[in-house]
């Protein structure tokens, strides 16, 4: 995760997070940033000061849980995922096909303080 100064564009911090990131959110009331990682983790980063950020830790989620939403009123993080079948064979039109979700396996995961 790269944190930048919004006014100058300068890099403030570069932090290690999980793989296959799809979403990030920042909760200004708690001073926490979140990264949803497709490998099955949620990285939590604390703003110690405007120029210092540290990784608090990684929460285990589920493989594929990459889409993230933050409710700033409740400070809850929502992630969605499903179980997936095998990926189809590559074709010239789709050289890297993605697996399809299996029916009935969609889930919403909720994380809070």
Image: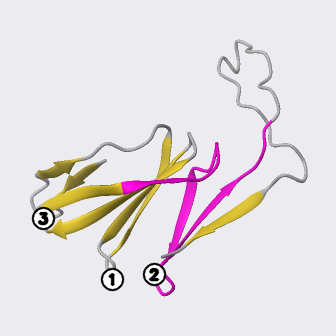
Earlier residue among tags 2 and 1: 1
Are the residues tagged 2 and 1 within 8 Å (C-beta)?
yes
Tell me the residue that label 1 is attached to: 29
107 to 97, vertically: above or below: below
Camera-nearest residue between 41 and 98: 41
**Residue depicted at x 18% and y 63%:** 6
Q: Bounds of the magenta span?
A: 57-84
Tell me the residue that label 2 is attached to: 72
Percent of width and height locating residue 53? 20, 59
Furthest residue toward right = 103
User: Alpha carbon of mark 3 to alpha carbon of mark 2: how far?
Assistant: 23 Å
Q: What crowding class fits label 1: few (fewer than 14 Cα within 10 Å), some (14-19), or many (20 or more)?
A: few
**Residue depicted at x 17% and y 50%:** 13
**In the displayed structure, does residue 48 sit left or right of residue 79?**
left
Earlier residue among tags 3 and 2: 3
Q: Secondary structure at mark 3?
A: loop
Q: What crowding class fits label 2: few (fewer than 14 Cα within 10 Å), some (14-19), or many (20 or more)?
A: some
**Residue depicted at x 35% and y 63%:** 33
**Residue depicted at x 23% and y 67%:** 47
Earlier residue among tags 1 and 3: 3
Camera-nearest residue between 56 and 71: 56
Image quadrant assignment for residue 87: top right
**In the displayed structure, does residue 86 sit left or right of residue 9?**
right
Tell me the residue that label 3 is attached to: 7
Image quadrant assignment for residue 79: bottom right
104 to 31, vertically: above or below: above
Q: Does residue 28 belong to the magenta stretch?
A: no
Q: Secondary structure at mark 1?
A: loop
User: Alpha carbon of mark 2 to alpha carbon of mark 1: how far?
Assistant: 8 Å
Percent of width and height locating residue 31? 29, 74
62 to 100, vertically: above or below: below
Q: Secondary structure at mark 2?
A: loop
């Amino acid at each position: 995760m790269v944190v930048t100064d919004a006014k100058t564009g300068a890099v403030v911090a570069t932090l290690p997070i999980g793989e296959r990131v799809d979403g990030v959110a920042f909760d200004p009331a708690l001073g926490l940033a979140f990264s949803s990682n497709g490998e099955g983790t949620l990285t939590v980063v604390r703003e110690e000061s405007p120029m210092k950020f540290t990784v608090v830790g990684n929460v285990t989620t589920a493989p594929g849980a990459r889409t993230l939403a933050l409710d700033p009123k409740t400070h809850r993080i929502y992630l969605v995922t499903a179980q997936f079948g095998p990926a189809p064979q590559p074709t010239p039109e789709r050289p890297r096909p993605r697996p399809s979700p299996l029916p009935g396996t969609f889930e919403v995961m909720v994380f809070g303080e």
